[in-house]
Amino acid sequence: MSNHLYRLVLQVPYESAEAFAEAIEIHCDTVAWTECQGETTAKVTGFSLKLPKEETVVRAVSIAAEAMGVLAPEVDISQISPKNWVLENIKQFPPLTVGRFFIYGSDFDGQIPVSRIPMKIPASTAFGTGNHGSTQGCLIALNGLKFGSVQTALDMGCGSGILAIAIAKRWRCPVVASDKDIKAVRIAKKNVAANGERGLITVVDGPGYQKRILKGRRFNLIISNILARPLVKMSNDLSNYIAPGGTVVLAGLLASQEVQVLMAHRMQGLKLKRRIRVDGWSTLVLQKYAQL
Ligand SMILES: C[S@@+](CC[C@H](N)C(=O)[O-])C[C@H]1O[C@@H](n2cnc3c(N)ncnc32)[C@H](O)[C@@H]1O
């Protein structure tokens, strides 16, 4: 192993973490991001075996910032020892238990608790290691749904595929997992295979509900951890794909954005069943009125 390892760190607004991670990806061997506890910011961390050219990275970050209309964050590049790098990665993504779900990364070599549903989700550039409050809110919501209540599910905005995997493992039912980001789709497919769920989960790429595979389908669970604005925009489409009496789990919104998301979905015949808040992030569990 090389004796030289370099770490790049950016503190960025949470919403822009994915774009900044993409901006530095080409200059690193691996990139991941985690939400800073209780904040609306995220820490994007890249590791590289070669010393990245600071001015090139700064330029890439500035271009990304300009495109998003946010301030360019400072780029912190430091050298660390390979040993520390491995330790840091493990520390950054320790195994996580949320209800009955036990999420662990590729470096985990401990004992998986027998009473839990294990999910292997290695750190990656796709959102969804389980550390973020919105993903945790969704897992808590899934944990609370009844055992026999799901027969077909859709995970809109699947990222790493974590929620689709949780659903398939808990209910042993077919799941469509969709994401507009082709890189996330690639990672989700890998994670689905690593968790032995290729038989139940179909991962597709494309924005929103425009995919052919969805045409004419009705799901009795739709879960979507995106952001408040796209959730509102897609509420009408969502209502066409949720079966009467079906459950909808919405996340990616701050507590202050609950009202706008709720209003949009109430207009589509959905009623609020449960509200979960983790680190300021709100998850809403709704139910579509059953047809008379
Ligand atoms: C916050 S991440 C959630 C990932 C994962 N489901 C979780 O809960 O951790 C949101 C994901 O939604 C995807 N996304 C955003 N807008 C979308 C859209 N209109 N259609 C499909 N996917 C979308 C993003 O690419 C990203 O991977």
Image: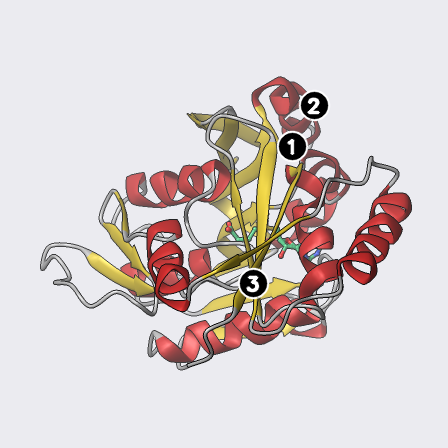
- Above-or-below relation of 99 to 196: above
Amino acid of disc 3: Tyr
Given residues 120 and 80, the one toward you in this image is 80
- Above-or-below relation of 120 to 263: below
**In the figure, is residue 236 to the left or right of 78?**
right
Pair 2/3: label in front = 3
* Position of residue 76 measured from the top left corner of the image (x, y, whole percent): 65, 47
Q: Earlier in the sequence, mark 2 or mark 3?
A: 3
> Badge 2 is on which residue?
260
Using the rendered image of the protein, determine whether residue 291 is visible from the camera's viewpoint. no
Cβ of mark 1 under 8 Å from ligand 1: the answer is no
| Label 2, label 3: how far apart the Cα atoms are | 43 Å
* Position of residue 284 measured from the top left corner of the image (x, y, whole percent): 50, 31
Amino acid of disc 2: Gln
| Label 3, label 1: how far apart the Cα atoms are | 46 Å
Q: Earlier in the sequence, mark 3 or mark 1?
A: 3
> Badge 1 is on which residue?
265
- For mark 1, give the secondary structure: helix
| Label 1, label 2: how far apart the Cα atoms are | 9 Å
Say the numbered circle drawn on residue 6: 3
Task: Determine the residue positioned at 66% across, 28% down.
Answer: 261
Pair 3/1: label in front = 3
- For mark 3, give the secondary structure: strand
Given residues 76 and 109, the one toward you in this image is 76
Q: Residues at badges 1 and 2 in contact (C-beta under 8 Å)? A: no
**In the figure, is residue 242 to the left or right of 231?**
left
Task: Determine the residue positioned at 37% across, 64% down.
Answer: 86
Q: Earlier in the sequence, mark 1 or mark 2?
A: 2
Say the numbered circle drawn on residue 15: none
Using the rendered image of the protein, determine whether residue 136 is visible from the camera's viewpoint. yes
